[in-house]
Amino acid sequence: MNSETHHSSVAAQAPDHGLIDRLASRLGVQGLLTDAGDKAPFEASARHGRGIARAVVRPASAEELAWVVQELVGADASFVVQGAATGLVGAATPSGSGTQWVLSTQRLRDRLEIDPVNRSAVVAAGYRLSDVNRAAAEHGLTFPIDLGADPSIGGMAATNTGGSRLIRYGGVRENVLAIAGVLANPPGARVGSTRGLRKNNTGLDWTQLMTGTFGAFGVVTHATLKLHPVQRQTAAALVAVDSAEVAMEILCSFEDALGEFVSAFEGMSGSALTAAVEHLPGVSAPFPVAPPYAVLLEVSSAVSKASGLDLESILMGWLETQIERPGMLDAVVDKPERLWRIRHAISESVQALGKLVAFDVSVSRSRFAAFRACSVELIAAEVASALVCDFGHLGDGGVHLNIVVAPETSVDAIVRLRSKLYQVVVEEFDGSFSAEHGVGPYNQAFYRCFTDQPTRALAGALHAQLDPQGRLGNVRLD
Ligand SMILES: Cc1cc2nc3c(=O)[nH]c(=O)nc-3n(C[C@H](O)[C@H](O)[C@H](O)COP(=O)(O)OP(=O)(O)OC[C@H]3O[C@@H](n4cnc5c(N)ncnc54)[C@H](O)[C@@H]3O)c2cc1C
């Protein structure tokens, strides 16, 4: 790290009225990164290229963070908040102008307190999901939002992360009891709380205002999370079917027969399954022939097998009742972790196949099969070379409609396909153009196009109140 020598060169780019010096003197070398090499990891986004950070500031407590925000706003500096940078819409990456700061929560790890009686955890924004689950497991508890990345808790709150077990537990919105944050206006004002209340019917709620609004209205410093009992037994199967219609029939039968034990129902096209199996070392194909479509289904319970409840036997018994179902091709019951390894590898495996075009959309479950058929047809008509490798959280109507296209496919063709597909999902199928990844520079234009005027007007009024100079983040909800 070479913060001192770089201070002067950064300061030479634009006047900062002593801001760099004040930040450096209070936060020290760990708290302020200005060297190009140190900044580089904070300039990359998980999917959408890179930006250029003016500098990276890393406060280590809520007090420091509030002071930093006050300083940045006071110096008229614009900044983007960044957690673990696993977001997929480019919202945590600085712009390419070189003038935007990154406010990283990486060092904001001053509280991780488990309350086993209240079944809750107060967590500073910079802790990762895996940190929380490690601490909660010591009390037989878990924060059950499950995904193939390890995001920060602040980022999860800001993006209202969904994940594979939403079918049972809901997303972050349903599992956050309180949020404490810092505002850009009044600069550095601290709002909200960390109270672990399950009931608090007293008016405006910062918790939900700051959840799923992508950091547009303030910086999350702490979240109080609802914990759930650790699952003491889990059983899973991979089922091959000949169509998405049959997958949805199986979902209904599965829920009807296994009720509250159902904890995941993930769909994947044959090409997505094949991509993952071929990408993973030491994994053999689960079926002799790749099926057109497959589902990973999971049951779990906090009640252990020793009690006499044997979920694997129950699952196998139910699968036997499905064998005669037209369109059901095959099924394997395997160790859940083996099946999840395949599922979680899909995203990366598909990306490795070539030029990726990704969609994160949702429709109501009852319209999923029709939507999938319609979108596959649309994709083929617009980009003939496209290989559709869709997968997703089918139990909640979500699909990552990822496609691989020939390298020579023009930007125009992709832009046209994106517009048409979003139009189909929103206008014909009453669905969402961003099911769980949220809104960022990558899809901001579609937010404007598909969000109704009264909603945007209210968001605009909140922006005007909470960030009148537009200093906070690179997402606008007005
Ligand atoms: C392999 C992979 C699998 C994924 N699977 C899923 C999935 O199944 N479901 C799902 O929902 N998402 C998924 N994601 C997306 C991503 O993991 C989530 O959006 C995640 O919650 C983002 O958290 P983060 O800490 O990485 O946030 P970042 O990427 O750092 O930031 C995301 C947004 O939150 C804002 N932000 C971050 N921290 C704060 C804070 N403290 N206060 C205010 N705003 C803040 C940023 O400014 C930005 O707008 C996946 C990503 C990857 C790479």
Image: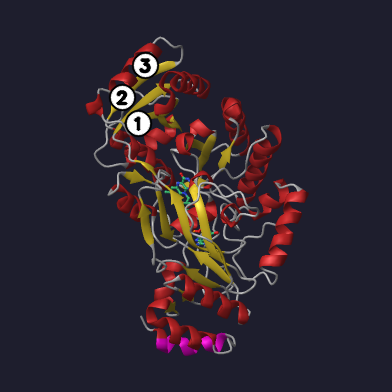
Mark found first going from the N terminus, 2 or 1: 1
Residue 182 located within the stretch drawn in magenta: no
The quarter of the picture where residue 235 lies is top left
The quarter of the picture where residue 60 lies is bottom left
Which residue is at 50% across, 87% downward?
22
SS for tag 1? Answer: strand
What quarter of the picture does the C terminus occupy? bottom right
Is the C-beta separation of discs 3 and 2 under 8 Å?
A: no
Q: How would you rate the neighbour count of disc 3 (Cα within 10 Å): few for under 14, some for 14-19, many for 20 or more? A: some
Discs 3/2, front: 2
| Three-letter code for the amino acid on which mark 3 is drawn | Trp
What residue sits right under mark 3 in the picture?
318
Left/right placement of residue 38 relative to residue 218 reads left
* Mark-to-mark CA distance, 2 and 1: 7 Å
Vertical placement of 216 versus 163: above or below?
below
The stretch in magenta equals 4-13
Q: Is mark 2 within 8 Å of ligand 1?
A: no
SS for tag 3? Answer: helix
Q: What is the x, y in percent for residue 435?
A: 57, 42
Residue 9 located within the stretch drawn in magenta: yes
Which residue is at 43% across, 30% downward?
270
* Mark-to-mark CA distance, 3 and 2: 10 Å
What residue sits right under mark 2 in the picture?
311
